[in-house]
Amino acid sequence: MPTAYFDTNVYIIGILQPDSNSRLILREIKKGKIKIVLSDYLIDEVMTWFKINKDKDFASMVRLYMMSLPASEMINDFQWSIFIDDWKDLVSDIDDLPHICSYFAGEAEYFVTANRKLTQMKIKKHVVFKSAKEFIEDVCGLDGIETVRGI
């Protein structure tokens, strides 16, 4: 079973846009076909986005949804923070560093994101980045959907 860390944008887009590769990924996750790495930082970021752009009740439902995903491993700040010194020089945006550290702490094989800036940082030599479309096609073996940036 492949192990992946999905960036904040995958959850937001997957929840809000039915015709997206991110939604296809969420369906595969619910089937238990993918082991996912979640982090407290990731969940806080998703929750904050939904609180601001929807409301706190919707955000709470999203949190419950994320916490109920099968084949998931939760990485907390004590686990991912030990990787900061190892990778901080390769990640120019400090907000991306906890995601990268969670990827390593959870021993993920893939990091799925639509963040092109992140995928162009020096860390790209050490992380297997995929767009949602690339992940759905290359890893899940499904037909992806043509969308902007493969989201």
Image (spheres, rainbow, N blue to C red):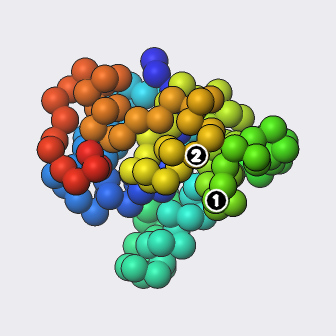
At 36% from the left and 40% from the top, the residue drawn is 131
Left or right of residue 98: residue 5: left
Nearest to the observer: residue 27 or residue 4: 4
Left or right of residue 108: residue 18: left
Residue 77 seen in render: yes
Q: Looking at the picture, which amino acid does disc 1 mark?
A: Asp
Q: Are marks 2 and 1 in contact (CB under 8 Å)?
A: yes
Q: Position of residue 40 (x, y in %)?
A: 66, 54
Residue 69 seen in render: no
> Which residue carries the number 1 mark?
93
> Which residue carries the number 2 mark?
121
At 31% from the left and 23% from the top, the residue drawn is 138
At 69% from the left and 60% from the top, the residue drawn is 94
Q: Looking at the picture, which amino acid does disc 2 mark?
A: Met
Using the numbered discs, state the Cα–Cα distance from disc 2 to disc 1 in whole angstroms.
9 Å
Left or right of residue 139: residue 81: right
At 57% from the left and 58% from the top, the residue drawn is 43
Q: Is residue 84 above or below residue 95?
A: above
Q: Quadrant of the N terminus?
A: top left
Task: Check disc 1 and report its element: helix, strand or loop.
Answer: loop
Q: Position of residue 126 (x, y in %)?
A: 62, 29
Task: Check disc 2 and report its element: helix, strand or loop.
Answer: loop
Q: Tell me if mark 2 has few (under 14), some (14-19) or many (20+) residues whose alpha carbon lies within 10 angstroms of its own.
A: some
Nearest to the observer: residue 116 or residue 33: 116
Q: Tell me if mark 1 has few (under 14), some (14-19) or many (20+) residues whose alpha carbon lies within 10 angstroms of its own.
A: few
Q: Position of residue 124 (x, y in %)?
A: 56, 36
Q: Nearer the viewer, mark 2 or mark 1?
A: 2
Left or right of residue 46: residue 79: right
Q: Position of residue 67 (x, y in %)?
A: 53, 50
